[in-house]
Image (tube, rainbow, N blue to C red):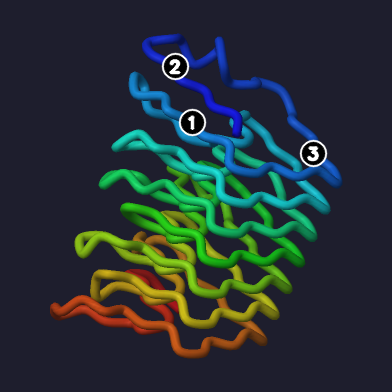
Amino acid sequence: ENAVALTRKPAANYMALGVITVSDCAFETNTAKATSPARGGSAIYGAQVVVSGSTFIGNRSTAASAGGGAIRTTTGSITNSVFIDNAAPGTNSSGGAVTASGAFTITGSTFIGNASGSYGGAVVAASATSAVLTITSSEFFGNRSTVASAGGGAVWADQAITLDQDYFEANTSASQLAGAVGLNNINYTLSVRRSEFVDNVATGTGQDGGGALWATGPI
């Protein structure tokens, strides 16, 4: 088990500002314990991350307010990779497996049993620009957002989302918002093509809903 505990270090000291390229690698039971500031990304933390053919199992970002149990980045891509039982369990922590804050692409990848203490049990993308989270030919099983005030059992974004040929099964949100996929921005569109949603659940109570999909903008 690898662990990183950081307190009060400037981001440039531990964030790769160039491109991190990872191919055919395995990351297992790594832990990020940073508390000031809380950054997340227990396996990989960088400005641009490009991952292919790799596995991420049981990685944890444990701070109360962190993001990305395995990966935290601004932009990049994930291709033909597997994420199992990664977590960002803090009460204000989003993206149990991956947190991005810009344009991001996921292709041919599988997310199983990842969990967050806040939004996005598997993936969160939050950008202040018109960036798009694109997910293609990927599968999400049993991921969960575990706090009643959040949502997105599998995926949550504040930017446009495009889904194509994806499969979502048994993902859960502890709130009434988005058992599988949620988009919280009236200016952007959640676009879905040739995808399947099975037994996803938004378990909370309230005026909103969306056992599979929830968005404040167009779907």
Identify the residue at horizontal 79%, vertical 39% (top origin): 22
Rounded to the nearest whole Å, what is the CA distance between mark 3 and mark 2? 23 Å
Quarter of the image for residue 206 reads bottom left
Q: Secondary structure at mark 1?
A: strand
- Foreground mark, 3 or 2, reads 2
In the image, what residue type sits under mark 3? Val
Residue at image position (58%, 21%) is 15
Q: Position of residue 7 (x, y in %)?
A: 38, 13
Q: Between residues 160 and 113, which one lies in front from this camera angle? A: 113
Between 159 and 13, the one nearer to me in the picture: 13
**Amino acid type at mark 1:** Ala
- Mark-to-mark CA distance, 2 and 1: 8 Å
Q: Amino acid at mark 2?
A: Leu
Closer to viewer: mark 1 or mark 3: 1
Q: Secondary structure at mark 3?
A: strand
Instruction: Give residue 118's position: percent from left, percent from top.
Output: 32, 54
**Residue at the image position 69 percent from the left and 42 percent from the top:** 27
Is the residue 119 above or below the residue 36 in the image? below
User: Is tag 2's residue or tag 1's residue first in the polypeptide sequence?
Assistant: 2
Mark 1 or mark 3: name the one nearer the start of the chain: 3
Q: Which residue is mark 3?
A: 22
Residue 182 in the image: x percent, y percent? 40, 68
CA–CA distance between discs 1 and 3? 19 Å
Q: Looking at this rendering, what residue extends furthest in the front direction?
A: 1
> Badge 3: few (under 14), some or many (20 or more) residues near its Cα, within 10 Å?
some
- The residue under label 2 is 6
**Residue contact at pointers 2 and 1, CB within 8 angstroms:** yes
In the structure shown, which secondary structural element does the residue marked by tag 2 occupy?
A: loop
